[in-house]
Image (tube, grey):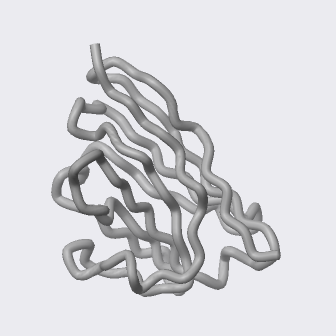
Amino acid sequence: QVQLVESGGGWVQPGGSLRLSCVASGFTLDNYAIVWFRKAPGKLREGVSCIRNIDGTTYYASSVKGRFTISRPYGNNTVYLQMNDLKPEDTAVYYCATDGPCGIMSTIFSHEYDTWGQGTQVTVSS
């Protein structure tokens, strides 16, 4: 069974950090690009970051560039999203997805992805 499971969300104060994990089962994650999306209440789902499988190239939304880092240590079927200097506007449910393209984040749309995790809640507040 093809599955993605996110973890690592939680509550953090502004300026804090969290590391999200996306673990794949039923397929080899190394063969696919991975994207992180987020969905905040009242807002459209937003592509946050993605990493290509071919060469490991990473892309970030302008809203998170310089604060978030996506990584995929080859061989452990997991992709991480390190989130530093978190802001209240980062509050959202974060999803990982695969089986779709990876490129400039403004050109990435959720309907292009076929496999999704269940999401993990990130709340940034004081």
Is residue 53 visible in the rendered image? The answer is no
Observer-nearest of 100 and 92: 92
72 is higher (above) or lower (below) than 1: above
Left or right, 126 with reference to 37: left
Q: Name the residue: 75% across, 76% down.
A: 2
Left or right, 106 with reference to 57: left
On the image, which quarter does residue 84 sit in?
A: top left
Residue 71 appears at what percent x and percent y?
52, 58
Residue 5 appears at what percent x and percent y?
67, 56
Observer-nearest of 38 and 61: 38
109 is higher (above) or lower (below) than 41: below
Q: Name the residue: 23% across, 30% down.
A: 88
Q: Name the residue: 68% across, 67% down.
A: 74
Residue 60 appears at what percent x and percent y?
29, 63
Is residue 121 visible in the rendered image? The answer is yes
Q: Quadrant of the N terminus?
A: bottom right
49 is higher (above) or lower (below) than 121: below
How many labels, in total? 0
